[in-house]
């Protein structure tokens, strides 16, 4: 099973990626940097770490992916609309570099970097091809273009294959206002808010719907070989603003005015995907003429997610600013409130000998210096100085202010004690904060180790389960092989039905034998629909199936034609002749994947191997099973075949009946030469206990046996039908 590590926070784009790769039986790991994100059901294991952390290397080493997909330009964790976009650009490059270095150090086979049209910010008159140099101007474009160069350089300098995929203006149905980042959704949002659109009809560009982007990326990643390391992916539709505006005006429920601002020369920003289209035969299935009405419908239906967001955000921002300001002012308010009783108390005890040795101002400053630190200590000291000066003015018995040396000594004491204790408090706080940060760092590292260990345990348990009971495990394959080889030699194709039903998870399976290279004859089937093509199929009548099977490929009914099987596979002999055809019916569309096609091929090969082995065994024992010089089975061999078809008939896998023949005065050899040409290769002639003969007609009901009896009657051979099988 292939594995992929997708790096980037969850959004509409990544969720579709997970569904696609999960459907194709890839094991998906994700690396995100937001702890609030909930792991999608398709993801096997989620890692939550900063892309710049050393833990990224441990994550890659733990999951050992075949491919790393860095969503880059389409990672929603990078906010390119902020004022500090330069910091976002620096963080983007640092994250990419760390992931690339870790991937190269661990020998990852393939690294895919997602870029966008943002690297081309000039206006062009011709289509933009991969060999044209990037022309970024803003921080975002420069960061994404630099990411391309770094990725391609690592591909040249290391053993890792690196691929850059530029997705042209990828758009989607936005779930909220933040996702309106592409030109189409921006215009739809503008029409909702303003009811007016300004368009430039000379501005042409190419877009790509998100579902088409996912399909294209899967083709790129799943390919065994890629001829180039840089691809443009687009829808091959030339789009202009006036075309989009026309669709918006036509589909919006309220009036939308279109203001034509067309000026200047024709401008093109059209990414040519000729290289990707030629190599991978990719065709976009979703046109903007179909998706724009869907976007409009969704936005209009969920207006609350798109309107008035800026105003709400501004109110919340103002509210948060006032809250922070109030929290910072609380210690100063406390200091001022406590100062009032200290001032009154100091004024009362002046002249009292019992309290003259107590300096309440000094205790007051010491209290705030110990609790809050130097800032509040200085503020409390200033208030204490003011308080002492006021005490001198209010007390007429006090000495003159300019000559009161005791006052100056007390002021100096207050500042020295306040600043010293406040400094020690601040230093202690800084030291304590540093120790707490170190403890938090160690706890985070410990938590990272626990997460990685938990992931490793899940992977270990997963592989343990696969070894024991998985459909792809060695034990399961051994079980399949054992069931086939334990089957009676004539019962292999019936045992194969049970195995195919279980492995492929469908109740409708049919197996045909190819005869004369022109016809397929039904050997066994597990239901009415499985044999709906008939008991005999002419190969020329179904070229859509057999042309593919002749190329030794698995046929997949991608048109979902109910009259055809959902999947088919052919088995060939050593001379490249088609011998057996397996049809699967009622297979769900999501299971019509490359994985299930390969699974059908493997199981079919096991069935054919056992079938050939059984046929060779029968041929080797021909002298024991057949009467000399004939194809007439001996009594015990014939009864054995009757029992096989009786059990198969009870399961509903086939029809059969027995014709009793009166040979009269003819010898066995004469009867054999007379009867054999009138029967099919899959029918059996055998001896009965009374010395007469019987014919086992396989896949033939009582009504159909009439035709065989008529042919034999014309040859003067008397028959009668048995009802006991």
Image: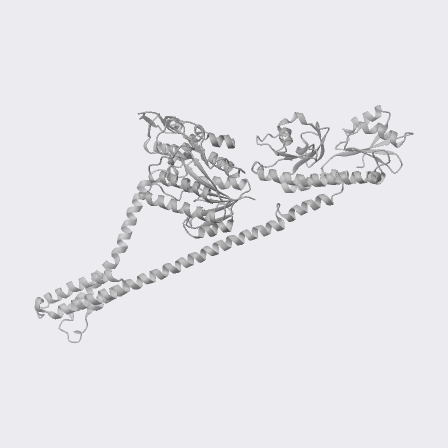
Q: Is residue 461 above or below residue 556?
A: below
The structure residue drawn at horizontal position 20% and vertical position 67%, both measured from the top left corner, is 416
Residue sitting nearer the eye, 249 or 345 = 249
Q: Position of residue 251 (x, y in %)?
A: 40, 28
Image quarter where the C terminus lies is top right
* Coloring scheme used: one colour
Residue positioned most to the front: 157
Note whether 293 is above or below 329 in the view shown.
above
The percent coordinates of residue 432 (x first, y second) are 34, 62
Quarter assignment of residue 611:
top right
Please, which residue is most extreme toward the right here?
665
Q: Residue at x 41, y 40 (%)?
A: 149
- The quadrant the N terminus occupies is top right
Query: Residue 694's quadrant in the figure?
Result: top right
Q: Residue at x 43, y 52 (%)?
A: 54
Instruction: Tell me where residue 599 appears, x and y as whole percent.
Output: 62, 40
The reply to whether residue 490 is visible in this rendering is no
377 vs 156, left or right, is left
Identify which residue, 158 or 240, lies in the foreground: 158
Q: Is residue 471 left or right of residue 177?
A: right
Residue 714 is left or right of residue 583, and the answer is right
**Coordinates of residue 24 in the picture (x, y in percent):** 55, 40
Q: Is residue 7 visible?
A: yes
Q: Residue furthest top?
A: 714
Q: Is residue 462 or residue 177 the one in the foreground?
A: 462
């Amino acid at each position: 099973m292939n594995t992929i590590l997708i790096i980037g926070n969850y959004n509409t784009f990544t969720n579709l990626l997970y569904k696609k790769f999960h459907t194709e039986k890839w094991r998906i790991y994700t690396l995100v940097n937001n702890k609030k994100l909930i792991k999608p059901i398709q993801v096997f294991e989620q890692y939550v770490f900063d892309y710049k952390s050393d833990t990224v290397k441990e994550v890659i080493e733990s999951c050992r992916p075949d491919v790393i997909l860095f969503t880059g330009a389409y990672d929603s964790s990078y906010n390119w609309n902020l004022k500090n976009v330069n910091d976002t650009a620096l963080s983007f490059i640092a994250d990419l570099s760390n992931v690339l270095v870790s991937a190269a150090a661990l020998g990852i086979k393939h690294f895919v970097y997602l870029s966008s049209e943002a690297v081309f910010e000039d206006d062009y008159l011709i289509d933009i091809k991969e060999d044209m140099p990037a022309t970024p101007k803003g921080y975002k474009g420069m960061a994404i273009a630099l990411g391309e160069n770094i990725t391609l350089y690592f591909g040249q300098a290391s053993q890792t294959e690196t691929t850059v995929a530029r997705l042209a203006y990828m758009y989607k149905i936005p779930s909220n206002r933040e996702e309106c980042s592409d030109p189409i959704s921006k215009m739809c949002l503008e029409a909702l808010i303003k009811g007016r659109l300004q368009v430039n009809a000379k501005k042409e560009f190419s877009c790509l719907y998100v579902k088409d982007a996912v399909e294209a990326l899967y083709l790129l990643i799943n390919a065994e070989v890629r001829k180039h390391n840089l691809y443009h992916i687009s829808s091959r539709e030339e789009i202009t603003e006036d075309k989009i505006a026309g669709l918006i005006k036509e589909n919006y429920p309220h009036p939308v005015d279109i203001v034509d601002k067309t000026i200047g020369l024709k401008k093109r920003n059209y990414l040519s995907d000729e290289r990707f289209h030629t190599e991978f035969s990719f065709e976009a299935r979703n046109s903007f003429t179909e998706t724009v009405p869907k976007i409009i419908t969704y936005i209009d239906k969920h207006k609350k997610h798109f309107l008035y967001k800026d105003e709400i955000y501004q109110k919340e921002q103002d509210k948060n600013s006032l809250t922070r300001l109030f929290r910072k002012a609380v210690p100063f308010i406390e200091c001022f409130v406590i100062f009032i009783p200290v001032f009154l108390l100091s004024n009362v005890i002046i002249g009292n000998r019992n309290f003259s040795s107590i300096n309440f101002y000094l205790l007051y400053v010491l209290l705030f210096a110990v609790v809050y630190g130097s800032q509040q200590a200085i503020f409390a000291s200033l208030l204490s100085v003011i308080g002492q000066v006021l005490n001198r003015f209010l007390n007429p018995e006090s000495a003159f202010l300019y000559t009161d040396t005791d006052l100056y000594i007390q002021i100096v004491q207050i500042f020295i004690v306040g600043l010293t204790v406040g400094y020690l408090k601040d230093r202690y706080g800084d030291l304590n904060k540093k120790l707490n940060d170190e403890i938090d760092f160690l706890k985070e590292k410990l938590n990272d180790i626990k997460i990685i260990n938990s992931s490793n345990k899940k992977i270990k348990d997963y592989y343990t389960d696969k070894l024991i009971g998985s459909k792809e495990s060695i034990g399961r394959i051994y079980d399949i092989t054992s069931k086939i080889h334990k089957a009676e030699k004539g019962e292999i194709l019936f045992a194969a039905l049970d195995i195919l039903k279980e492995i492929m998870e469908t109740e409708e399976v049919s197996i045909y034998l190819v005869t004369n290279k022109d016809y397929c004859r039904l050997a066994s089937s597990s239901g009415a629909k499985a044999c709906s093509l008939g008991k005999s199929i002419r190969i020329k009548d179904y070229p859509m199936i057999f042309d593919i099977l002749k190329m030794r490929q698995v046929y997949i009914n991608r048109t979902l034609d109910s009259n055809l099987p959902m999947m088919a596979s052919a088995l060939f002999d050593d001379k490249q002749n088609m011998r057996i055809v397996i049809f699967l019916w009622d297979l769900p569309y999501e299971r019509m994947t490359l994985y299930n096609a390969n699974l059908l091929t493997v199981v079919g090969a096991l069935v054919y191997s056992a079938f050939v082995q059984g046929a060779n065994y029968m041929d080797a024992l021909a002298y024991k099973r057949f009467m000399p010089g004939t194809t007439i089975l001996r009594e015990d061999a014939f009864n054995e075949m009757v029992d096989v078809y009786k059990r198969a008939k009870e399961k509903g896998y086939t029809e059969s009946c027995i014709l009793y023949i009166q040979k009269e005065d003819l010898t066995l050899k004469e009867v054999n030469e007379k009867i054999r040409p009138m029967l099919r290769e899959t029918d059996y002639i055998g001896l009965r206990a009374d010395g007469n003969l019987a014919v086992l007609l396989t896949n033939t009901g009582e009504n159909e046996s009439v035709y065989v009896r008529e042919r034999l009657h014309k040859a003067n051979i008397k028959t009668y039908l048995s009802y006991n099988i």
